């Protein structure tokens, strides 16, 4: 069996899921070198070498890789920050190690303004109406307030506020969800505006899906759609988060989608892909350059935003169900030989547990905290005791003196795999309940039959209005 060295630049459960996929390779003996934000207990256990770089500084990552360049055959990047900072550009230049992620030039999520302007060129019909507000244009708050309120008049207040900078899904504010008055909207707007440009978009009515595709620069291989749960609490209440969970259906489609919906998503992303690569191959796009949030409206799918990395949590729905060896997939991306991806026709459900400080849970109406548990070690169940259809991926957790502690963000993800969504959900909930300590909490309605039925009926009603 061939021995291969793999560098994984990791943060959170997404990185743990990639490391898990590599470690389960049937074709290769994998030596995994991990650069992490903290001592993730899962990654520490599986890595041949593990180092922490809390800010994932590109130059420090390059220094680590350079010293091991003769042992590392390829690398892959999970989190967005190093991709935006140009980690691939630096590592490939200084070490010669092929890196699976887009170059800095194609880190599309670096600017939401640039994204919208790209779509205006490549797929203008996929954009909502939007206006960009730039701080340098205005002398005072009253001037920007006047223009903002004029734009809200056009939108009849149905607006979405987005900071230009990446905010891991947490910077977005939506009329009717996060604010119900112009005063509240203005406060949200100004909180973002003090840091730079802000986009104010038309709010679109529909159901969301997450599209992902592996890419070698010339070929795009779409993955099955998934559904993410951004809001913190049950019933889609509370602030936006990095994602409290997600699900994948048995096939490529979500329950509320028709086959032509997925085909339309693929056609849209192909248009953007072809616009970016112009002609021939564009190896700078390899990896997952299109992790795209779609919203399915009465007029068809529209794009909410695009990212240039694997989804967190959505990639965790896919990796455990890959029929292809993940090492081979990465090799093919690096060599420009990717032609297709095969995924098992099974369902998966991801549920996150988070600490009391996350998303304001401790102060929320849902809070049921045993205060003496806060800050205590967390006991993660042994995977072998949970069975082959469960995965437990620590995220914002740290190993200290042999014990595992939750940090400030989403702490641990559990993935259930089964023949149906509901069976996968029940497995995931079993795994969640087996995690003890730290006063961790989770949403209980991820992929619930009630939530799925509600989204399906909502989509059915929207389609009726379009006919």
Image (cartoon, helix red, strand yellow):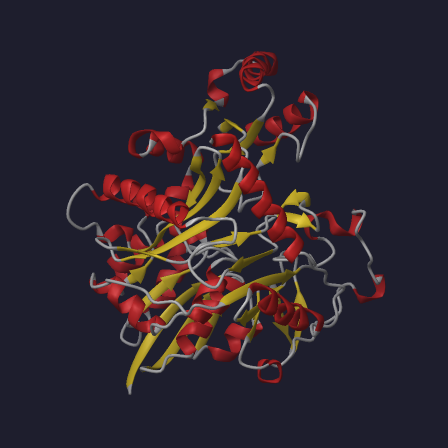
Look at the picture and state if 124 lies above or below 271: above
Counting from the top left corner in percent of width and height, residue 50 is at: 47, 73
Res 49 → quadrant: bottom left
Res 374 → quadrant: bottom right
Numbered circles on residues, count: 0
> Left or right of 412: which side holds 57?
left
Q: Is residue 117 visible?
A: no
Look at the picture and state if 19 lies above or below 159: below
Q: Nearer the viewer, residue 388 or 363?
A: 388
Going 23% across and 43% down the picture, which residue do you hit? 274
Q: What quarter of the picture does the N terminus occupy? A: bottom left
Counting from the top left corner in percent of width and height, residue 444 is at: 70, 59
Counting from the top left corner in percent of width and height, residue 164 is at: 48, 34
> Left or right of 465: which side holds 341?
left
> Left or right of 426: which side holds 281?
left
Res 72 → quadrant: bottom left
Q: Nearer the viewer, residue 61 or 261?
A: 261
């Amino acid at each position: 069996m061939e021995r291969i060295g793999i560098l994984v630049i990791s943060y959170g459960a997404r990185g743990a899921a990639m490391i898990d996929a590599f470690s389960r390779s049937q074709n290769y003996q994998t030596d995994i070198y991990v650069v992490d934000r903290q001592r993730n207990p899962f990654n520490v256990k599986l890595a041949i070498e593990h180092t922490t770089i809390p800010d994932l500084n590109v130059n420090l990552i390059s220094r680590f890789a350079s010293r091991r360049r003769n042992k590392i055959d390829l690398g892959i990047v999970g989190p967005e920050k190093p991709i935006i900072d140009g980690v691939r550009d630096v590592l490939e230049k200084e070490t010669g190690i092929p890196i699976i992620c887009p170059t800095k030039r194609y880190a599309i999520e670096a600017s939401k303004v640039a994204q919208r302007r790209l779509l205006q060129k490549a797929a203008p019909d996929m954009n909502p109406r939007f206006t960009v507000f730039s701080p340098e244009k205005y002398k005072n708050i009253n001037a920007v307030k006047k223009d903002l309120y004029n734009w809200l008049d056009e939108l009849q207040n149905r607006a979405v506020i987005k900071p230009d900078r990446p905010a891991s899904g947490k910077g977005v504010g939506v009329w009717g969800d996060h604010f119900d008055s112009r005063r509240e909207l203005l406060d949200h707007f100004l909180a973002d505006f003090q840091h730079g440009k802000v986009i104010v978009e038309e709010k679109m009515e529909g159901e969301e899906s997450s599209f992902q595709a592996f890419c070698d620069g010339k070929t795009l291989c779409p993955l099955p759609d998934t559904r993410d749960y951004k809001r913190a609490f049950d019933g889609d209440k509370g602030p936006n988060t990095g994602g409290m969970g997600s699900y994948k259906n048995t096939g490529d489609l979500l329950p509320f989608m028709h086959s032509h919906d997925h085909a339309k998503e693929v056609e849209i992303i192909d248009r953007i892909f072809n616009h970016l690569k112009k002609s021939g191959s564009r190896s700078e796009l390899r990896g997952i350059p299109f992790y795209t949030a779609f919203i399915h409206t009465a007029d068809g799918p529209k794009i909410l935003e695009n990212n240039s990395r694997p989804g967190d949590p959505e990639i965790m729905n896919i990796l455990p169900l890959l029929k292809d060896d993940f090492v081979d997939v990465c090799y093919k991306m690096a060599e420009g030989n990717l032609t297709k991806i095969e995924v098992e026709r099974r369902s998966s459900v991801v549920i996150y547990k988070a600490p009391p400080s996350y998303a304001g849970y401790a102060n929320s109406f849902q809070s049921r905290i045993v205060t003496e548990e806060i800050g205590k070690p967390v006991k993660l169940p042994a995977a072998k005791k949970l069975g082959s259809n469960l995965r437990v991926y620590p995220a914002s957790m740290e190993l200290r003196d042999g014990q595992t502690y939750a940090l400030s963000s989403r702490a641990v993800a559990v993935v259930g795999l089964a023949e149906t969504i509901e069976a996968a959900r029940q497995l995931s909930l079993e795994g969640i309940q087996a995690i003890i300590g730290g006063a961790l909490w989770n949403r209980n309605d991820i992929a619930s039959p009630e939530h799925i039925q509600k989204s399906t009926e909502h989509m059915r009603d929207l389609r009726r209005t379009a006919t």
